[in-house]
Amino acid sequence: MERSENNHEKIWTRDFIQIVFANFFIFLGFQMTLPTLPLFVKELGGSDQWIGIIVGVFTFSALLFRPYAGRLLETKGRRYVFMLGLAVFVISVGSFAFITSIAFLVFWRIIQGFGFGFSSTASGTIATDLIPPQRRGEGMGYFGLAGNLAMALGPALGLMLVGKITFTALFLICATTGLIALLLSSTIKYKEVEQSPHKTTTIKFDIFEKTAIQPSLLLFFITFTFGGIASFLPLHAAERGVAGIETYFVVYAIFVMLSRIFAGKIYDQRGHLYVFPPGVILITVAMFLLMWLPSTTILIFTAAIYGFGFGSVQPALQAWAVDKAPDNRKGMANATFFSFFDLGIGVGAIVFGWIAQQYGYQFIYFTAGLSVIASLFLYIYLMVRARFQRRANV
């Protein structure tokens, strides 16, 4: 509590800057593998369905371990979970460099999911600890910018390098980014574990924070689109004869940054009603434009509106998920949020792998567009229900 009082309005403390950069390097290494792993799978002789499985098994592994990470954050502490996750991430990604079969790739993707699930859940919770509560939407926007910037630059960098160096060298570079994050994190002053009388004693079935379910469920339908973007967009663009896939990810990064400038502040001042619906509309339009994809111009325009939409929606939903959780459940709220994040990507990747195999890449983005529309209808339902409940309680 002393940290909040001493830094009443200050977000950019030394510790916060370090966790932001650590988060950037975690996601950079991970995102560099997303568009390049499908190419690696093809080189190993795998099909489109195997691509979906390789992406999906990672996210389901992260999903499985995130609740344990959330619980350990409150019992073992932030440093323990974060450092363990980063170490496992570095070892697993480095192991990709020596893989010669699909079976071993599946195994190490499961291990990578463990490391990424622990480290990314911990980093979000650590950031929450460091941000003044009254500026949480703005602060999480800045924190999320690091991950989303890496999410944009990583694929572009990976695709650029894969044509110039071997997959072995590429995966060793990705592991090095995780090592940089580990070094950056070693001097952060972490919040100590609090022994709260309100802390749950339920261990076996304590896997979600119920106050975070609504925003996390909305996020599921949004991140469902990610499997189609990261895993299959390079292949889809090549099939359509559309150039500029590296530029797509750079433009996406720029517009994510633009959205972060004000989206968090709007959430803090006006709430998610002024952030979520406009962002979802932009993402929906982007999906249907990718289904069409007649030219590089449309590809780049899609990058802009997708980046602006997702860059606005994701931090607002994360702040929403954390805000309503009790102080001793912030870690579990972040774990719940990212579990649904992973679930959306994992389900999307496997579904899109099957769709690509059966119907072609174009139908991936039609399905993704329907998923985003579903999130908007769910949001409207939740808001209407909440209004009726408030009236009933008056």
Image: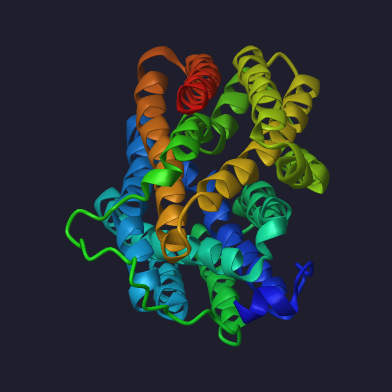
| Colour convention of the picture | rainbow
Q: Residue extending furthest bottom?
A: 187
**Residue 130 point in image, percent of width and height:** 63, 70
Q: Residue extending furthest front?
A: 394
Asked whether 239 or 119 is in front, the reply is 119
**Residue 103 point in image, percent of width and height:** 24, 51
Q: Residue at x 67, y 22 (%)?
A: 286
Quadrant of the image occupied by residue 109? bottom left
Quadrant of the image occupied by residue 24? bottom right
Residue 109 appears in the figure:
no
Please state the total of marks drawn on the protein image: 0
Image quadrant where one finds the N terminus: bottom right
Where 54 sits versus 380, above or below? below
Asked whether 134 or 379 is in front, the reply is 134
Q: Residue at x 65, y 53 (%)?
A: 144
**Residue 110 point in image, percent of width and height:** 30, 56
Q: Along the horizontal axis of the image, is 22 left or right of 62? A: right
Asked whether 37 or 331 is in front, the reply is 331
Residue 249 appears in the figure:
yes
Where 161 sits versus 17, above or below? above
Quadrant of the image occupied by residue 104? bottom left
Q: Residue at x 63, y 25 (%)?
A: 280
Where 132 sits versus 334, above or below? below
Where 189 sits versus 127, above or below? below
**Residue 32 point in image, percent of width and height:** 58, 54
Q: Along the horizontal axis of the image, is 296 left or right of 162? A: right
